[in-house]
Amino acid sequence: DAGVIQSPRHEVTEMGQEVTLRCKPISGHNSLFWYRQTMMRGLELLIYFNNNVPIDDSGMPEDRFSAKMPNASFSTLKIQPSEPRDSAVYFCASSPTDRGFNEKLFFGSGTQLSVL
Amino acid sequence: AQSVSQHNHHVILSEAASLELGCNYSYGGTVNLFWYVQYPGQHLQLLLKYFSGDPLVKGIKGFEAEFIKSKFSFNLRKPSVQWSDTAEYFCAVNARGGYQKVTFGTGTKLQVIP
């Protein structure tokens, strides 16, 4: 298996532009997480899907952020409009939840987002 | 709601020194506990985990962690660090039961000096 695949690896955009980050989880994993990593706040959970359904989006900073999981093999995180304070590394992670809890997260390589 | 606190943000050690990184969690029920490591330029990977049983858990590369329920703690230890242990270490908690999220601490940067 190729692991969790994120794209793009790097994104540089101007303030006000729409940004879309993509994630392909490991096949068979039924939980998917989006995290944001910054120097100031470490690793923050943005949203968590289970079986393609958003379970907890309390970490989404504001309405400018939205996430979708249209099927088991694809998820997007969209920021519209983007702002400089959104600059961070965004990680996607997936997990099998066979025993009713998340046994281990498998992380993607992350998307380094810079909003100028 | 569950939360995780890591007390040390940046730790600098010489090679062969002993390591202990603190982690405390807040949650009233049963939890799973994890330590993840992020080496420079790489993504996070699992170091060790605790689900149940022996509260002293051994992980990869000589790391271990002890779950002390009465203190809500899950400290990471290694008797003798190496330069290759330079990385950022994250403690995480997952409340048991149902569809529960995994919450991470803010991380501890470890720098090992040769």
Image (spheres, coloured by chain):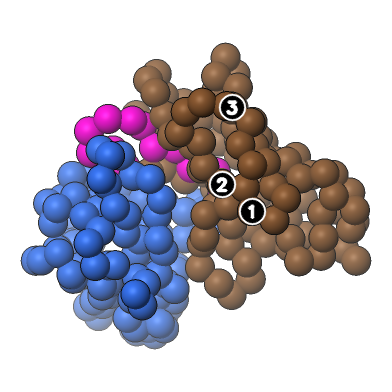
What is the quadrant of the C terminus of chain A in the image? bottom left
For marks 2 and 3, give the CA distance.
Answer: 12 Å
Q: Which mark is residue B55?
A: 3
Q: Is residue B99 magenta?
A: yes
* Mark 1 or mark 2: whose residue is earlier in sequence: 2
Position above or below: A114 against B21: below
Q: Are marks 1 and 2 on the same chain?
A: yes
- What amino acid type is highlighted by mark number 2? Leu
Residue at figure coordinates x 24%, y 67% from the top left: A27
Q: Please name the amino acid that badge 1 sits on.
A: Ile
- Sort mark 1 into few (<14), some (14-19) or many (20+) by Cα contacts within 10 Å: few
- Residue B18 in the figure: left or right of residue A109: right
Q: Nearer the viewer, residue B68 or A37?
A: B68
State the CA–CA distance, disc 1 to disc 2.
7 Å
Q: Pointer 3 indicates a residue of which chain?
A: B
| Magenta region | B90-101
> In this figure, which residue is indicated by the disc labeled 1?
B60
Q: Colour of chain B?
A: brown
- Label for residue A33? none
> Is residue B96 in view from this perspective?
yes
Q: Is residue A62 visible?
A: no
Q: Position of residue A44 (x, y in %)?
A: 41, 51
